[in-house]
């Protein structure tokens, strides 16, 4: 095994442990030795993305694809990285990966997810259904299929797929938020509130999750749960909006009607669309 291969193995182990800064440092050093290695470039891009350095990640994914790799998994990974920036090179990379390795759930998942966000639902579902069939025990397959169905407007199908994902990964609080929003869009207010309140308790730093839970609980008359979510929202760091929090506090104080109105007509639809469209 070459030194670069050994380095990549160590880097992937660090990534599995969430030690992204160490992974970045290791691969940055490797890049000095192999500046055109598509694997080093791609996995360093992954580390930079996880470290919230999108500009660096984009450049690395772009350079990886420029090496014209033929590994389907690498093409899928780098292509998905480019898709987050609406780069036109994303689609051919993802398509090539899915068509050259149709037996790999990962390639079918990535291409299907991309197509769904582009509004190409028939082809998207073809690939996502295949991904689920290839890896039925992988919650990501069901979760992404649920997202595609929600974007398509099949709310019942979306909720069913998301519930399957949560059965396989009960700690997936991101999907639980989506499930709550889909239930709300479908008019299932109590079920939606239950999911949103539970998700918010799991996502303490997610301001939007707290805002949704506060309004959903208040709309059901669950005053204690509404105020618990408001208290967490006051300290949430991710996406905190002081002006919005003040408005939500006023709605919660005013009772179920005003809370329900703000949730259903303003906040929930915009957050649902934004989160459904967020790339893999």
Image: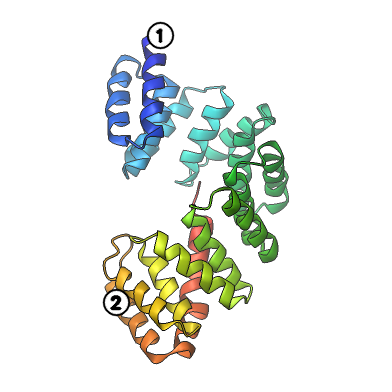
Helix, strand or loop under label 1: loop
Give the residue displayed 50% in from the left and 49% down from the top.
279
Q: How crowded is the residue under tag 2: few (<14 C-alpha within 10 Å), some, or many (20+)?
A: few
Query: Residue under circle 1?
Result: 2
Q: Say which residue appears at 64% left-offset and 62% top-offset.
A: 159
Q: Image check: 234 left or right of 209?
A: left
Residue sitting at x 67%, y 41%: 136
The front one of 120 and 150 is 150
Q: Quadrant of the N terminus?
A: top left
Q: Against 278, is 267 above or below?
A: below
Way the structure is coloured: rainbow
Residue at the farthest top position: 1
Determine the CA span between mark 1 and mark 2: 55 Å
* Quadrant in the rendering for residue 39: top left
Q: Is residue 184 above or below residue 33?
A: below
Name the foreground residue: 160 vs 225.
225
- Residue 255 at what x, y percent from top left? 43, 90
Q: Position of residue 28 (x, y in %)?
A: 29, 25
Q: Camera-side residue: 151 or 62?
A: 151
Residue 96 occupies quadrant: top right
Q: Position of residue 18 (x, y in %)?
A: 36, 37
**Observer-nearest residue: 86 or 172?**
172
The numbered mark at residue 243 is 2
In the rendered view, would you say 34 is above or below 115?
A: above
Dot 1: within a 10 Å radius of its alpha carbon, few (fewer than 14), some, or many (20 or more) residues? few
Q: Residue furthest front?
A: 224
Q: Position of residue 247 (x, y in %)?
A: 34, 82
């Amino acid at each position: 095994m070459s030194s670069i291969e050994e380095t990549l193995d160590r880097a992937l182990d660090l990534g599995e442990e969430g030690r992204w800064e160490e992974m970045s440092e290791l691969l940055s050093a490797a890049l000095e030795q192999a500046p055109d290695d598509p694997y080093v470039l791609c996995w360093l891009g992954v580390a930079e993305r996880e470290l919230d350095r999108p500009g660096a990640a984009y450049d690395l994914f772009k350079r990886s694809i420029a090496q014209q790799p033929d590994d389907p998994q690498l093409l899928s990974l780098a292509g998905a990285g480019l898709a987050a920036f609406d780069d036109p090179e994303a689609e051919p990379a993802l398509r090539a990966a899915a068509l050259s390795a149709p037996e790999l759930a990962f390639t079918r998942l990535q291409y299907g997810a991309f197509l769904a966000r582009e509004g190409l639902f028939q082809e998207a579902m073809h690939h996502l259904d295949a991904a689920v069939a290839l890896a039925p025990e992988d919650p990501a397959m069901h979760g992404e299929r649920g997202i595609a169905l929600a974007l398509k407007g099949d709310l019942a199908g979306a909720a069913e797929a998301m519930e399957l994902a949560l059965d396989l990964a009960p700690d997936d609080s991101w999907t639980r938020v989506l499930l709550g929003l889909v239930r709300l869009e479908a008019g299932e207010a109590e079920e939606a509130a239950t999911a949103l309140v539970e998700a918010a308790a799991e996502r303490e730093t997610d301001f939007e999750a707290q805002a949704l839970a506060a309004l959903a609980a208040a709309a059901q008359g669950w005053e204690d749960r509404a105020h618990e979510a408001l208290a967490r929202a006051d300290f949430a760091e991710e996406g905190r909006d002081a002006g919005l929090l003040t408005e939500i506090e006023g709605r919660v104080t005013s009772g179920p009607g005003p809370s329900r109105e703000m949730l259903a007509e303003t906040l929930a639809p915009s957050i649902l669309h934004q989160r459904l469209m967020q790339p893999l």
